[in-house]
Image (cartoon, grey):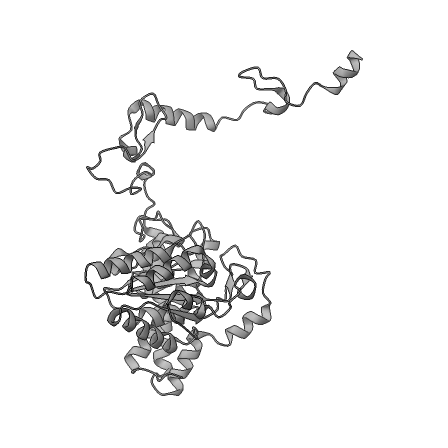
């Protein structure tokens, strides 16, 4: 077991993990209250993997993750207020309320976002590392992805390119034993995921993802290799999520006893207990870390609740990078005889606005009677005959 660092570092690691855990718990509660919309994927149980990784990254390093990245952004230094506001779909969110849970983003801290497509962040990570190499920067890229993504075509292609071009990148697979609801034994022929990139020239190692110090030391070595040797590596961190794949997951694919067994390995409780037993931290410091997390999350909910929703007429904004070149339209709105730029929704012609409002008003009017089925009654607009043929009773009369 790796030695504990100094007291200040231990407290910071514990406080970060406690904050992420409390944030995720509250995010789940707010989702049930319909405050947070869209999908919600919680990382409760995976805090050691997140904090151990980010604790040894430099400010100039890039991090790109999956759709389970509230904690990753917070661990990189993003204000929890902004993360919670993004879950609420508010203007003060990390993406202006337009991305939601699956698309947290903070370019200032080089957190290049949660990514909703499984395995889709892998080639992007290679691109980030290539950019750093091309510009002669000392930055490394960390790409975190789930066990299921190791089965995608992007995985093999990215490993090959990273090794071929000796990119300064660390690939970290968060193996929580399930790809959605499919166990790793059923979705991967090679269950030791650390070996899956060896054939491409990317060496791998497997570590305990419930031990924040083990993760911290392994990632530090991986980053050293990326930075000093420009050699990509793969780390498999074996971890576990205590909640379902998403908030809508009924969890019928695993037994309650399995979850309880993994709860005995809780990364926060285990680390706190170890620090106290070693005399590095006292019970008072542990309590302070938990209290601080509670207060921070309470303030984040209040902030998000008070943040306004994006105005409706900004719907088409931030869809594209608008420049003077090539000068074309990025979207077209044809709801009136006067088509206009879709990205300029707020400046639509008066005629277009009037027609749009009239259409919305018409949609609210309830039709009288039951709407006819065109397959039976034919199309009233072009007098198309019924597609079901003549009525059997009519045939009998003719006979």
Residue 194 x, y percent position in the rendering: 43, 70
Expressed as whole percent of the image width and height from the top left, the position of residue 260 reads: 55, 72
The quarter of the rendered structure image containing the N terminus is bottom left
Q: Quadrant of residue 47?
A: bottom left
State the image coordinates of residue 42 (x, y, percent, origin top left): 44, 61
Is 312 located above or below residue 362 in the figure?
below
Q: Is residue 320 above or below residue 292?
A: above
Q: Farthest residue toward the top?
A: 398
Is 390 left or right of 88, judged from the image as shown? right
Name the quarter where the C terminus is drawn: top right
**Residue at 39% from the left image edge and 70% from the top image edge:** 235
- State the residue in front, 181 or 124: 124
Q: Taking 394 as reference, is 310 left or right?
A: left
Residue 114 shows in the view: no
Along the line of sight, the residue nearer the viewer: 151 or 327: 151
Relative to 18, say whether 278 is above or below.
below
Identify which residue is drawn at 25% across, 69% down: 227
């Amino acid at each position: 077991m790796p030695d504990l660092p100094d007291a200040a570092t231990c407290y910071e690691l514990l406080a970060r993990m406690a904050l992420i855990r409390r944030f995720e718990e509250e995010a789940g509660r707010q989702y049930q209250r319909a405050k947070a919309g869209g999908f919600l994927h919680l990382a409760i149980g995976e805090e050691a993997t997140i904090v151990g990784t980010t604790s040894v990254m430099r400010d100039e390093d890039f991090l790109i993750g999956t759709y389970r990245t509230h904690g990753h952004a917070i661990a990189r230094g993003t204000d929890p207020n902004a993360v919670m506001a993004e879950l609420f779909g508010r203007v003060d969110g990390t993406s202006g309320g337009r991305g939601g849970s699956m698309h947290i983003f903070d370019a200032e801290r080089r957190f290049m976002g949660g990514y909703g497509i499984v395995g889709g962040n892998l080639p992007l990570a290679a691109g980030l590392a290539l950019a750093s190499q091309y510009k002669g920067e000392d930055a490394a890229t960390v790409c975190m992805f789930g066990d299921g993504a190791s089965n995608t075509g992007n995985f093999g292609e990215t490993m090959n390119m990273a090794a071929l071009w000796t990119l300064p990148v660390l690939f970290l697979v968060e193996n929580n034993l399930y790809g959605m609801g499919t166990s790793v034994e059923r979705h991967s022929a090679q269950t030791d995921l650390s070996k899956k990139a060896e054939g491409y020239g990317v060496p791998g190692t497997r570590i305990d993802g419930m031990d924040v110090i083990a993760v911290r030391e392994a990632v530090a070595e991986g980053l050293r290799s990326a930075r000093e040797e420009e050699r990509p590596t793969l780390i498999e961190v074996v971890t576990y999520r205590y909640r379902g794949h998403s908030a809508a997951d009924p969890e019928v694919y695993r037994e309650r006893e399995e979850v309880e067994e993994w709860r005995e390995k809780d990364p926060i409780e285990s680390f706190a207990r170890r620090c106290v037993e070693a005399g590095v931290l006292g019970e008072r410091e542990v309590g302070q870390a938990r209290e601080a997390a509670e207060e921070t999350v309470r303030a984040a909910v209040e902030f998000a609740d008070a943040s306004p929703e994006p105005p409706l007429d900004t719907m088409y904004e931030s869809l594209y990078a608008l420049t003077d070149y090539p000068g074309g339209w990025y979207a077209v709105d044809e709801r009136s005889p006067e088509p206009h730029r879709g990205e300029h929704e707020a400046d639509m012609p008066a005629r277009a606005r009037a027609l749009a409002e009239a259409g919305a008003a018409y949609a609210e009017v309830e039709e009288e009677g039951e709407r006819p089925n065109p397959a039976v009654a034919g199309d009233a607009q072009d007098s198309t005959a019924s597609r079901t043929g003549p009525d059997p009773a009519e045939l009998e009369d003719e006979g």
